[in-house]
């Protein structure tokens, strides 16, 4: 993409002295790599638990954001909220306005096939969707966004070193929380038949933004419940499995 195409749109709401309507960070306060859980309180937990020299850069709309160091390397973490539109706004601004180069989504997902068990990590190689998020690009076809391969390769290697069970492949990013789908089980089983072994709500929008802005993105998820076995993660499993996900994601600190 030509350099002039990467400049801000003339109607952008970004101001260097006060940020955007959604993010009050000033230039230089956000690292080049950002971890993005859906829950802003999870962002605070990771910052408090794993990072040193933490500085909070955002609290607008309760979407907490922090920058700190992990093993001497700088990294930021900020909530994305739930769903593609929320992820779309925050990740776009991070990429376009704040010079962020890599966003790693960290969150939970529902398992759609027996291949993904509760507690497993899921690395989203690509994302399918029932959303029309990509309609904005007027492509005249169906866009299939993918993770950055270098980020994916690093995450897989980190999981293997730690003997953490994981699955890599295509996931479903849905506008509808799977349990609330009016089609019931038939809604997700059709996607599972096509090889989507897990479902979230944010990955597709993130990958589209990364592709459009020529940035890098990866989604790392922990399977918290299975639509197949109807198992849900216990509080003990949640603590261990989320720790595994955080450890892998923090490998991207630079």
Image (cartoon, rainbow, N blue to C red):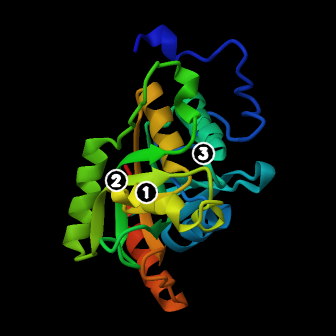
Specify the quadrant of the image occupied by residue 8: top right
Mark 3: few/some/many CA within 10 Å (<14, 14-19, 20+): many
Nearest to N terminus: mark 3 or mark 1: 3
Q: Are marks 2 and 1 in contact (CB under 8 Å)?
A: yes
The secondary structure type at the circle numbered 2 is loop
Comparing 63 with 198, the one in front is 198
Dot label at residue 84: 3
Could you tell me which secondary element the residue under label 3 belongs to?
A: helix
Q: 194 or 205: nearer the eye? A: 194
Q: Is residue 91 left or right of residue 105?
A: right
Q: Under tag 1, what secondary structure?
A: helix
What residue lies at 41% left-to-right and 32% top-to-bottom? 215
Placement of the N terminus among the 4 image quadrants: top left
Query: Where residue 119 appears, x then y in whole percent?
Result: 40, 78
Q: From this viewpoint, is residue 149 visible? A: yes
Residue 161 screen position, x and y as percent: 20, 71
Task: Give the side of residue 100 with respect to residue 214, left or right.
Answer: right
User: Measured from the top left, where is residue 64 in percent x and y?
Assistant: 69, 56
Vertically, is 170 above or below 22? Answer: below
Q: Which residue is mark 2?
A: 194
Q: Residue shown at 41%/69% (left/top)?
A: 245
Residue 215 in the image: above or below residue 246: above
Give the CA separation, mark 3 to mark 1. 21 Å
The answer to which of marks 3 and 2 sits earlier in the sequence is 3
Q: How many marks?
A: 3
**Which residue corresponds to mark 1?**
190
Question: Is residue 250 among what the camera can see?
Answer: no
Q: Nearer the viewer, mark 3 or mark 2?
A: 2
| 57 versus 160 height, above or below | above
């Amino acid at each position: 993409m030509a350099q002039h195409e990467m400049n801000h749109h003339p109607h952008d709401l970004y101001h260097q002295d006060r940020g955007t309507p959604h993010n009050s960070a000033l230039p230089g306060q956000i690292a080049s790599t950002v971890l993005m859980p859906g829950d802003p309180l999870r962002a605070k937990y990771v910052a408090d638990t794993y990072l040193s020299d933490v500085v909070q850069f955002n609290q607008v709309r309760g979407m907490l954001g922090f920058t700190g160091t992990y093993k001497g390397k700088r990294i930021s973490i900020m909530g994305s909220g739930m769903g593609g539109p929320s992820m779309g706004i925050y990740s776009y601004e991070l990429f376009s306005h704040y010079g962020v180069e890599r966003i790693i989504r960290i969150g939970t997902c529902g398992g759609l096939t027996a291949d993904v068990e509760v507690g497993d990590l899921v690395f989203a190689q690509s994302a399918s969707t029932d959303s029309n998020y990509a309609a904005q690009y007027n492509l005249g076809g169906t866009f299939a966004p993918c993770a950055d391969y270098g980020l994916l390769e690093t995450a897989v290697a980190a999981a293997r070193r730690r003997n953490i069970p994981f699955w890599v492949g295509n996931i479903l990013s849905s506008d509808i929380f799977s349990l609330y789908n009016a089609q019931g089980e038939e809604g997700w089983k059709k996607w599972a038949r096509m090889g989507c072994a897990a479902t979230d709500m944010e990955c597709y929008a993130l990958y589209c933004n990364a592709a459009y802005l020529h940035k890098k993105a990866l989604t790392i998820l922990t399977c918290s419940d299975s639509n197949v076995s109807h198992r849900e993660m216990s509080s003990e499993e949640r603590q261990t499995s989320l720790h595994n996900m955080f450890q892998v994601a923090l490998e991207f600190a630079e």
